[in-house]
Image (tube, rainbow, N blue to C red):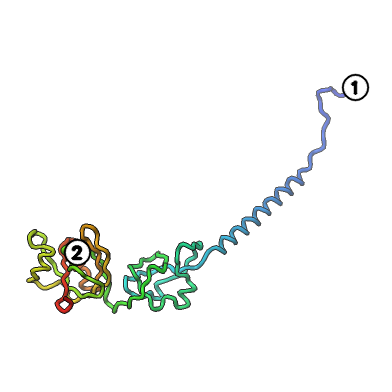
Amino acid sequence: MPGAPPPSNVRPPSAPRDRKPALAALGLLLVLVGALASVYLQQRAGNRVGVVEIVKRVPQGQAIAADSISEVMVAVDSNISYVTWSQSQAGALHGYTARTDLLPGTLLVGQMLTTVLPLPPGQEVVGLSLKDGQYPIGIQVGDTVSAYYVSNKNDDKTGQSFLGDGFTTPPIVASVRVYDVGTASNNGSLDISLVLGQLNANAVAQAASGGNLVLAFDKHTQ
């Protein structure tokens, strides 16, 4: 019937809501998040420092050449005494040698350096782990020793017996300098480093790994 009121269960149409304020708020929030992230990254970058990374192997006892190092950024850590890139460029590495064998990827710290004079070309430091009887008592840094190969098949004539009775065979190498001496363990084992020519280094290391190496003082150092 014309003019009749609409049914009570039919809602009159309403005007669409304006979503622009919500979108504007979301955009503002994203801008704030981006700004905070930028500040955070800048602060993190400010807490990083350029340090020295080894990119080419530096044998123990050798000086660290310019082409053996590169710069890498790391987080600042007051508990680690990194050698910074600025220090290296200012000549801080001059007069220092590698205390141990430095491999590529190593981050250089002060404890890895020593003021021991660099080794002559063609020589390297070889570390040996010797048992009681394979080295002379009282061995010290700077001593000169000879390295002998002994057979471990004759159990009554090994180790300290050779040191006391002398050797009847020529040494693998004679008159080599003792570079470093560790602290003897409870069972008498001792880590000793020798300065060897590259031709003799493998022979000495192989004899030591098989338990067939004995060091003895050279006569002029006894």
Residue that mark 1 sits on: 4
Task: Tell me the residue at 21%/68% (across/down).
Answer: 202
* Mark 2 to mark 1 CA distance (whole Å): 113 Å
Task: Tell me the residue at 45%/74% (across/down).
Answer: 88
Residue 39 vs residue 191, the one in the foreground: 191
Would residue 132 appear left or right of 93 to someone viewing this image? left
Would residue 210 appear left or right of 123 to someone viewing this image? left
Quarter containing the N terminus: top right
Residue 171 vs residue 41, the one in the foreground: 171
Q: Is residue 9 above or below residue 47?
A: above
Residue 137 vs residue 50, the one in the foreground: 137
Mark 2: few, some, or many residues within 10 Å (few <14, many ≥20)? many
Find numbered disc 2 in the image and state the secondary structure of the residue it sits on: helix
Which quadrant would residue 123 be assigned to in this image? bottom left
Would residue 13 appear left or right of 83 to someone viewing this image? right
Find numbered disc 1 in the image and state the secondary structure of the residue it sits on: loop
Amino acid tagged 1:
Ala
User: Residue 33 location in percent, x, y?
Assistant: 65, 53
Quarter containing the C terminus: bottom left
Residue that mark 2 sits on: 208
Looking at the image, tell me whether mark 2 or mark 1 is earlier in sequence order.
Answer: 1
Task: Tell me the residue at 7%/71% (across/down).
Answer: 168
User: Residue 57 location in percent, x, y?
Assistant: 35, 69
Residue 21 vs residue 111, the one in the foreground: 111
In this view, which residue lies farthest toward the top? 1
Amino acid tagged 2:
Ala
Foreground: disc 2 or disc 1: 2
Disc on res. 61: none
